[in-house]
Image (cartoon, rainbow, N blue to C red):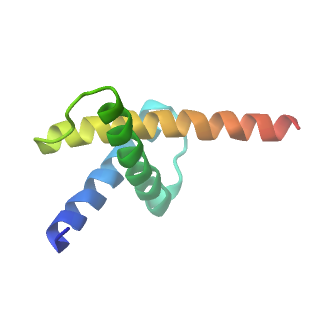
Amino acid sequence: MSETGWLVFIVIGFAAGWLAGQIMKGDGFGIVGDIIVGVLGALFGGFLFSRLGASTEGSLFVSLIVAIIGAVILLFLLRLIEKVLRRG
């Protein structure tokens, strides 16, 4: 991946992480945390959509939507794990 490709991936990851934090009504994890959640969400969303047979390639908009969906699912799972750990 080129330098520009990595930069776009990080920007999409940041945007997806921030938007997922807004959707999930959370405080977020800060800039670095949002980037990490967004990038991991993008990877997870891409994996999930490919397993469902949906194409995730094409426009930046499609990549952003897939990354947001993946980040929302990831945030949901992280918060669920956090709740379980607090109880135990």
Instruction: Identify the residue at horizontal 85%, vertical 34% (top origin).
Output: 87
Is 32 situated above or below 39?
below
Looking at this view, name the residue that lies furthest to the right: 88
In-image side of 84 versus 43 (left or right): right
Q: Quadrant of the C terminus?
A: top right
What residue occupies the far left of the structure in this picture? 59
Residue 69 occupies quadrant: top left
Q: Residue 31 placed where, x, y %? A: 44, 60
Seen from the viewer's position, the closer of residues 58 and 47 is 47
Residue at x-position 11% and y-position 42% = 59
Q: Position of residue 71 (x, y in %)?
A: 43, 40
Is residue 52 rendered to the left or right of residue 84? left
Residue at left offset 20%, top offset 59%: 8
Q: Where's residue 13, x and y in %?
A: 33, 52
Q: How many labels does the image show?
A: 0
Q: Is residue 64 left or right of residue 25?
A: left
Does residue 14 appear to the left or right of 1 in the view shown?
A: right
Residue found 20% across the figure and 67% down from its top: 1
Which of the two residues, 34 or 59, is positioned nearer the viewer here? 59
The answer to whether 39 is drawn above or below residue 56 in the figure is below
Image location of residue 36, percent across then percent down: 45, 57
Q: Quadrant of residue 55?
A: top left
